[in-house]
Image (cartoon, rainbow, N blue to C red):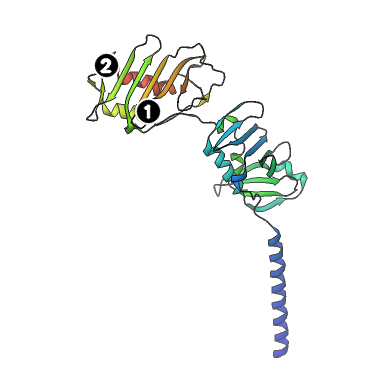
Amino acid sequence: MDNKKLAIILVALVAVFLIGRLLSGKGESNFDSNLVSVDTANVDKIAMTGPHGTVILTRDGGSWVVSDGAGKQAPALKTMAQGVLSNLISIQSQRIITSSPDKWVDYEVTDTNGTHVVASHSGKTLADLMIGRFAFNQATRSGTSYIRKAGQDDVHAIDGFLSMNFTRDFDSFRDKSLATLTPADVKNLSLISGQDGVTKNIAKSADGKWMDDNMPLDSATVAGYLSGLRFLNGTTFDDHFSPQGKTPVYTLDINTNSQLEPLQITCYGGEGNSPFVFHSSHNPDAYFASDSTQLYQTVIASFLEMIKHDQ
């Protein structure tokens, strides 16, 4: 084979290679991995509706409100709302699983078995998605979620457990905190009994020792008690409770160096398996049910145990 023929073959091979790359690049350019492109600052409402029910997050100035679409609403944790926004704009398609509507049910992205997520601004839709199921790969310890954009047939595979972030219930977005404090900042506490009006006080002396009147308290015990109040959260909301006409069983006032008003935690009598209901000035819109081993143990029983020498 002479040099001329070799040159022709080489040119032909290069041409085939370049054409292949061109066609490949063209196909890849048509695939847009960004399923959502919005400015989160413009989103003032996120509605999530699916088998779990309806959850609506609405921006209220610098805060968020969560509602269930049926008239029930409460302040939402800002971090939870921001988390939903962050998850929304981070959605990146790894690949298209199917474009057949017949397969939608397998990935739970139909109008009836998926979670419909709509982000909007002043009533104008900015993003509209059907969030489907997720699959967990035991071998790689990784998850895959499935999503379909409303009005489109393609079902996209998304790395991670994105589906779980959009299928939370109403209470998951609410503020469950009862107290947030710095133990070293606390200067005194007062527990008032609603039954007999007796007040038990403990205070930190000038030299940093904790005293119950003139009786010294074990510093490690007090430190452990205050640590339990540092990030105190309730577990179960009691939205049917009303304090009207009810006398608290106990009221705990916590005075700190950084707050002019004391942090107040109130314990009311409850019913059935939850004989106590807790409320705090830190989160005045919420009431939490408790049995004798939950909030009651942390806030009340532990305080009484700490000063038992005086009883």
Answer left or right for 10 relative to 141: right
Cα separation, mark 1 vs mark 2, equals 31 Å
Q: Position of residue 203 (x, y in %)?
A: 28, 24
What type is the residue that disc 2 sits on? His
Q: Nearer the viewer, residue 250 or 104?
A: 250
Q: Position of residue 305 (x, y in %)?
A: 33, 19
Residue at figure coordinates x 30%, y 17% from the top left: 308
Residue at figure coordinates x 37%, y 11% from the top left: 197
Mark 1 lies on residue: 260
Q: Nearer the viewer, residue 61 or 282?
A: 61
Question: In the rendered view, would you say 309 is above or below 221?
Answer: above
Q: Position of residue 4 (x, y in %)?
A: 72, 89
Question: In the rendered view, would you say 311 is above or below 6?
Answer: above
Mark 2 lies on residue: 309
Q: Residues within 10 Å of mark 2 (few under 14, many from 20)?
A: few
Farthest residue, direction top:
196
SS at mark 1 in the image? loop
Viewer-side label of 1, 2: 1
Answer left or right for 121 relative to 246: right
Q: Quadrant of residue 292?
A: top left
Q: Nearer the viewer, residue 251 or 222?
A: 251
Q: Quadrant of residue 74?
A: top right
SS at mark 2 in the image? helix
Answer left or right for 187 relative to 30: left
